[in-house]
Amino acid sequence: MICVKIAESMSSSSQVFYPGSLEFITGTSHWASSKSQVSACSVEPETPQEVGNIIRELASTRTPFAVKGGGHSLNPGFSSTPGVHISLRRMNDIVIHEDSKTVDIGAGLTWTDVYAYLVPRGINVVGARLGKVGVAGFTLGGGYSWKTSQYGLAVDNVVGYELVLPSGQVKVVTEKDEDLWFALKGGFNNYGIVTKFTFKFHNQTDIWAASLNFVGDLMEDAKAAFAKFLTREHDHKGAQQAQFIYINGTVVMSLSLFYDGPEPPEGLYDELLQLSTLSRSIFKGSFTDFITGTFLPTFPRGYFDGIPMVRFTQPVIEAHANESKFWGEALSKYDENVVVVYTFDQYEPGFLTHGGPSAYPPDRSRAFLTSNIFVGWSKESVDKLVEDAVRSSRATLIAAGINDGQDLKNAVRYPNYALFGTAVEEMYGEHVGRLREIRKKYDPFDIMGLAGGWKI
């Protein structure tokens, strides 16, 4: 049995677990439990060399496998398998290099782990807005952040990868490795298993944030005010996120304002803070406390999908609000626990200029903003209905953008949001050919094709 062979090849510091054990459940669990599968075993290597040994064993038997960092993907089979499940959670070291202003971050960590270690030391990196998201998948898919207007995407801030190639060889990839350097910036696990990232770090002070919530007529005023706010360029230390949330028969507009400093400059958010709200809260304190205080409910089942936009105008914002209400009401007829959330983020002009050529985004001269559809529900019988609803809603919002005069032809989709079944050409554009050539060079026997995820 392959699991026994792997166990025999591993040191005492790494382990293999089987169904029924608590360690197995922990290692294979996901944010949405419907995305977990019962694997033959769960393997937890502690070194990249042991990851290499595991890959060799899997390759020799052509055994399907999965690689899981944080387990936040909602696409079925992307980080789960009925074969051998590789959990990276023992790849959990963080090492700061003051001389180069870089930090090594293990691929098995979540962003809560990273922020909790770095922020008390007065430094930080470009990471996820939600602490429970894993470092690996977020970074390998591009990585939009509260700090994107200042520093770009997560991939723009990585200066090195520790990569276990499909051959089992361990390689440190830097900008000198032109092809792998390009491919790993958005190309996920197509080129091997990344066990460590080296990020540039920057200084971190306390931050300021506000949460404003609106319903009914209050929401009408908020939509108009936010649309007006988005027509102007603002301080790049600021970031804004809007959500339309359908829950328990009601649509709530939630507006999150962020400033990467103790106080926003006078006038930055005044017009939004003057709005009448259902409720509001102001946060001043550490970045870590802000992130860990962001509530992220779990759902038995869930899907994401992303929609590229050039800009969020009032008609486009109205379309998001309408879709939230329409699909919330429609789906709740079949599952009373349905929650529907439409989220969109604003970044300041030039946010893609912080990085060079990368798998994603394929064209840095065209900067697309991204909105995100999320549906959470409980009944397995509703799965196909939700999938169809998400795809239909995405088409409706694309049409709204086109009707708004936006050029969305060949608009690329963000891989970390895209729903399963999305063609890789829609995410990587003209780069698909080059990415396939690189994969053929480093994975001629299609070993990584045995794992889930976007396959280029």
Image (cartoon, rainbow, N blue to C red):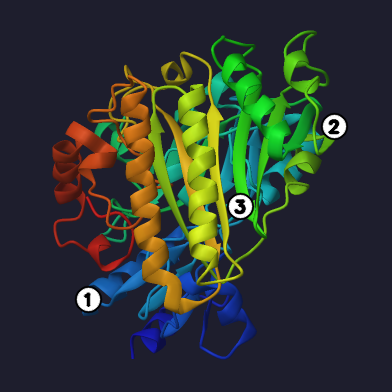
Mark closer to the chain start, 2 or 1: 1
Callout 1, which amino acid? Arg
- Which residue appears farthest toward the front when viewing the image? 217
Where is residue 97? Give x, y as percent.
63, 32
Residue 443 position (above or below residue 240)? below
Q: Is residue 141 left or right of residue 317?
A: left
Residue at position x 80%, y 8% in the image: 266
Residue 194 position (above or below residue 101)? below
Residue 263 position (above or below residue 280)? above
Residue 282 - label: 2
Q: Is residue 234 left or right of residue 430?
A: right
SS at mark 2 in the image: strand
Of tags 2 and 1, which is closer to the observer?
2
Of tags 3 and 2, which is closer to the observer?
3
Q: Nearer the viewer, residue 18 or 333?
A: 333
Where is residue 278? Give x, y as percent.
80, 39
The alpha-carbon separation of the residues under discs 1 and 3 comes to 45 Å
Mark closer to the chain start, 3 or 2: 3
Q: Using the rendered view, name the quadrant where residue 193 is placed.
A: bottom left
